[in-house]
Image: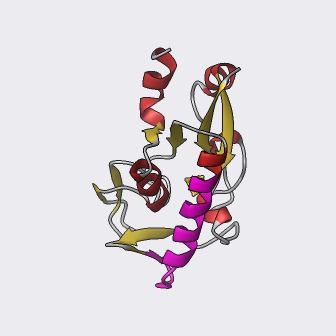
Amino acid sequence: KKENVLISACFMGAGCRYDGKSIHLDRLDELKEKYNLIPICPELLGGLGTPRSPAEKVGDKVINKEGQDVTAYFQRGAEKALKIAKMYDCKYAILKEKSPSCGIGKIYDGTFSGTLVEGNGITAELLMKNGISVIGESQIGKLLNCK
Ligand code: SF4
């Protein structure tokens, strides 16, 4: 039986990004062959729609481009993503880098200028705190080569 791995839904062709687009992921076919991928979009799970205003983390809060505090949506989405990860016993999550939900290591700085700072998205952080290994798309080679 294939191991379940959580994945950002925008990599699986779901047009769930703020601009309604999805994102091409190299080696998706290899991942599908090896793992049972469980797609989640924390921002939609949290109650936001598509398209939506882009948002960035500012300290512990998430603020959208209109200046609205959307932190509660992001937190709700992170909790639901964690619940799904536990339900499917996922040890790994492949998440979209730089996103205020899914990003790991580096995220945008809250000025909507494309500037990156050290930090994790709200969902990435909650998953890691609960022992799930979060892997950004530039690191999927590690997951594909490890077994
Ligand atoms: Fe993709 Fe995550 Fe953003 Fe949803 S919240 S669109 S899964 S990066």
Instruction: Give the magenta part as a residue range.
Output: 62-83
Please, is residue 67 above or below residue 7 in the view? below
Classify residue 94 as left or right of residue 133. Answer: right
Relative to the observer, which residue lies in front, 30 or 126?
126
Q: Residue at x 45, y 62 (%)?
A: 122
Query: 86 or 16: which is nearer to us?
Result: 86
Ligand 1 in which quarter: bottom right
Q: Say whether residue 58 is left or right of residue 118.
A: right
Q: Is residue 22 magenta?
A: no
Residue found 43% across the figure and 44% down from its top? 131
Q: Is residue 30 visible?
A: yes
The image quarter containing residue 44 is bottom right
Identified at 60% across, 47% down, the residue is 86
User: Residue 90: image x %, image y %?
Assistant: 58, 38
- The mark total stands at 0
Q: Residue at x 42, y 23 (%)?
A: 142
